[in-house]
Image (cartoon, helix red, strand yellow):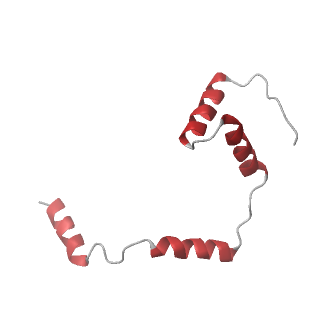
Amino acid sequence: MPTITIKNIPEELYEALKSTAENHHRSINSEVIIRLEQALLPRLKTPKDKLTNIQRLRAQISPNVISADDIDDIINNGRA
């Protein structure tokens, strides 16, 4: 597998990369590889992929969490 060396990384950029890697529980090297993949090899989503994602997210939402009466009460209380 090829290896690269990156020189003269600005301190601010390095610290941001280090922090992001820690937040994702990854090494700095793994974080760099993932970021390069995201930037250079974006996965194009088809309309079907997008629809599946929307449906998955919609299934997680509880319907009718706020009723029309709740909205009226909030509006009326805000005018008091």
Please state if 77 lies on the left or on the right of 59 as rendered.
Answer: left
In the image, 44 versus 74, the foreground residue is 44
Please state if 62 lies on the left or on the right of 34 as rendered.
Answer: left
The C terminus: image quadrant: bottom left
Where is residue 12 shown, x and y percent of the image?
A: 62, 26
In the image, 63 versus 25, the foreground residue is 25
Q: Residue furthest front?
A: 1
Residue ID at (87%, 43%): 1
Question: To which quarter of the image does residue 73 belong?
Answer: bottom left
Residue ID at (26%, 76%): 67
Q: Is residue 62 above or below residue 28?
A: below
Please state if 80 lies on the left or on the right of 61 as rendered.
Answer: left
Q: Is residue 45 above or below residue 39?
A: below
Q: How many marks?
A: 0
In the image, 73 versus 20, the foreground residue is 20
Residue ID at (85%, 36%): 3
Where is residue 16 shown, x and y percent of the image?
A: 60, 32
Residue ID at (16%, 66%): 76
Where is residue 44 shown, x and y percent of the image?
A: 74, 64
Q: Residue furthest right?
A: 2
Question: To which quarter of the image does residue 50 belong?
Answer: bottom right
Where is residue 45 shown, x and y percent of the image?
A: 70, 67
